[in-house]
């Protein structure tokens, strides 16, 4: 079985039996691990090379301490935030994660129903195992769509147009995998389980890796030619000329690229390293937030994900200037463990923890969270 990297490993006697037993999101990790085949667990939990960036994402939060304030009336706290004119009850959103049906038969539909019940923003992966139209119906409103470009521009355009027609208001262009990645830990598990994997996935509509409806539906034209290079900043213009959806870029980790994103008319920037799966920088996203915020200079919202597990993690990112914070693996642990109810409970826990930290810090609104509420460790910033 693949070794967990992202949180305290739970022994069998410690596993929770129901969502009501969960004290934090890590309680779902151990349950999820016992329910998944080795291959599925490896795919979800692995990172680039030896997982150093996954570890860095968690360790980065230790670089910042909370500065608690006293004797402030915190009997009422407002966690709402506004994104592109729409107000959400919380700045916590569900990151795009591929293949939800690998973890639960209801897949993205269970996640969408949980997002609807708890009123959270949801983003859907290009590699979804459920069509966007069905996810939107389950969510009760259109989700944001995460875009992986296709080898042919005609197919990318077709995908974008389908998503736009489905009513999705925002397109999240992911750029942190364009150079490839080295997921050696996953590859090692795959080598040891090839026969078992083949028998599990072949012909199974829920787990077959070829079951990617958004990609499989794309037409292939004999006149189309593959892109001769990987996308550059000029690709943003292509997307903006193709759709009226908001265009966001996911995978920005430096001030320089944040400034270039603004110069090219991007509507929002995501600080992300794909949960430690994309690169080998061993640099946490929480440590990248100040640089990206400085590059954006208030011209667009700044989103961040990768490694967030606690309400205090979320609070620190907001204090450093992030607009909203995403979680991926935690809600997938919940989905795997207890389906829709598991996802809902993960969101409840994170919201409760965020509210607790706000009260401890003497803050009554998201807008009230500032740099004055955290202190960087000496010598760090």
Image (tube, grey):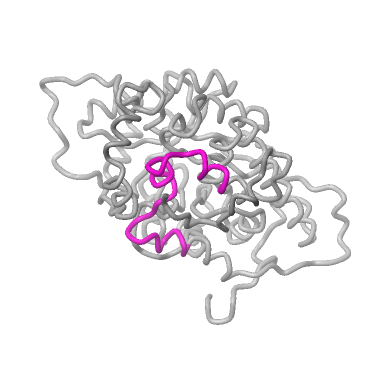
Q: Position of residue 17 (x, y in %)?
A: 67, 40
Indicate left or right for 162 with 233 as reference.
right
Q: Position of residue 266 (x, y in %)?
A: 41, 44
Residue projecting furthest to the front: 13
Where 272 falls versus 224 (above or below)? Answer: below
Q: Position of residue 281 (x, y in %)?
A: 36, 64
Is residue 106 one of those drawn in magenta?
no
Q: Nearer the viewer, residue 109 or 252?
A: 109
* Number of numbered discs: 0
Indicate left or right for 207 with 105 as reference.
left
Residue 374 picture quarter: bottom right
Residue 148 picture quarter: top left
Residue visible at 66% across and 44% down in the picture? 16
Q: Position of residue 49 (x, y in %)?
A: 32, 59
Q: Nearer the viewer, residue 13 or 223?
A: 13
Indicate left or right for 122 with 315 as reference.
left
Residue projecting furthest to the bottom: 379
| Magenta residues, start to end | 29-56
Indicate left or right for 313 with 161 as reference.
right
Q: Main secondary structure of the magenta part?
A: helix
Residue 110 picture quarter: top right
Is residue 37 one of those drawn in magenta?
yes
Where 144 falls versus 253 (above or below)? Answer: above
Q: Nearer the viewer, residue 144 or 39?
A: 39
Residue visible at 45% across and 19% down in the picture? 166
């Amino acid at each position: 079985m693949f070794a967990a990297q992202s949180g305290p490993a739970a022994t069998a006697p410690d596993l929770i039996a129901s969502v009501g037993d969960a004290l934090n999101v890590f309680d779902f990790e151990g349950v999820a691990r016992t329910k998944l085949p080795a291959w599925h667990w490896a795919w979800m939990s692995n990172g680039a090379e030896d997982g150093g960036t996954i570890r860095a994402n968690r360790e980065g939060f230790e670089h910042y301490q909370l500065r608690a304030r006293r004797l402030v009336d915190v009997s009422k706290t407002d966690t709402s935030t506004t994104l592109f004119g729409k107000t959400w009850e919380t700045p916590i959103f569900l990151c795009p994660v591929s293949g939800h049906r690998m973890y639960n038969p209801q897949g993205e539909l269970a996640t969408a129903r949980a997002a609807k019940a708890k009123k959270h923003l949801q983003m859907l992966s290009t590699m979804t195992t459920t069509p966007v139209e069905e996810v939107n119906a389950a969510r009760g409103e259109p989700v944001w769509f995460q875009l992986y470009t296709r080898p042919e521009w005609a197919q990318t355009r077709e995908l974008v147009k389908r998503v736009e027609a489905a009513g999705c208001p925002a397109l999240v262009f992911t750029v942190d995998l364009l150079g490839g990645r080295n997921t050696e830990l996953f590859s090692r598990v795959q080598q040891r389980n090839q026969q078992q994997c083949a028998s599990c996935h072949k012909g199974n509509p829920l787990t077959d890796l070829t079951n990617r409806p958004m990609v499989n539906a794309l037409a292939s034209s004999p006149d189309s030619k593959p892109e001769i290079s990987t996308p550059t900043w000029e690709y943003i213009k292509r997307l903006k000329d193709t759709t009226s959806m908001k265009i966001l870029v996911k995978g920005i980790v430096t001030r320089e690229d944040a400034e270039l994103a603004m110069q090219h008319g991007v509507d929002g920037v995501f600080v992300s390293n794909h949960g430690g799966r994309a690169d080998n920088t061993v640099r946490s996203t929480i440590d990248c937030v100040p640089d990206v915020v400085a590059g954006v200079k208030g011209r667009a919202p700044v989103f961040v994900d990768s490694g967030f597990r606690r309400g205090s993690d979320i609070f620190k990112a907001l204090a450093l200037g992030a607009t909203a914070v995403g979680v991926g693996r935690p809600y997938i642990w919940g989905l795997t463990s207890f389906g829709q109810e598991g996802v809902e409970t993960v969101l409840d826990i994170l919201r409760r923890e965020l509210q607790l930290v706000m009260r401890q810090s003497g803050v009554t609104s998201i807008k009230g969270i500032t740099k004055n509420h955290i202190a960087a460790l000496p010598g760090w910033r």
